[in-house]
Amino acid sequence: MAQRPPSVWEFVTLGSTMVGCIVGGLVVGLLIDHYARTMPVFTVAGVGVGLVAACLAMYGRVRSLFK
């Protein structure tokens, strides 16, 4: 059975998932830093967690696309 190429929509959702993970981590980190008055500790940690989540999401999505 021939494998179909990924559609543009699949790449758009992959990119938006990655951006959502990173921005979500940034926002959560900024909010925690604002209330805890610990700038930039949790902001950096939030971006790091967002990057890890984005990489894991990308790995899972790409793996399922090219299986």
Image: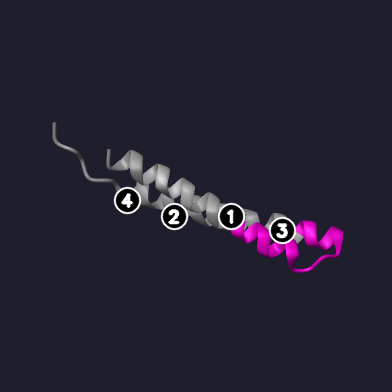
Q: CA distance from mark 3 to mark 1?
A: 10 Å
Q: CA distance from mark 1 to mark 2?
A: 13 Å
Magenta range: 31-48
Amino acid of disc 1: Gly
Q: Residues within 10 Å of mark 4 (few under 14, many from 20)?
A: few
Q: Residues within 10 Å of mark 2 (few under 14, many from 20)?
A: few
Q: CA distance from mark 3 to mark 4?
A: 32 Å
Residue at image point 32% right, 51% down: 8
**Quarter in which the C terminus is drawn:** top left
Residue beneath disc 4: 8
Mark in the foreground, 2 or 3:
3
SS for tag 3? helix
SS for tag 2? helix
Q: Are marks 4 and 1 in contact (CB under 8 Å)?
A: no
Q: Earlier in the sequence, mark 1 or mark 2?
A: 2
Q: Earlier in the sequence, mark 4 or mark 1?
A: 4
Amino acid of disc 3: Gly
Q: Is residue 16 visible to us here?
A: yes
Q: Residues within 10 Å of mark 3 (few under 14, many from 20)?
A: many
**Quarter in which the N terminus is drawn:** top left
> Along the horizontal axis of the image, is 1 left or right of 31?
left
Residue beneath disc 3: 29
Residue beneath disc 1: 50
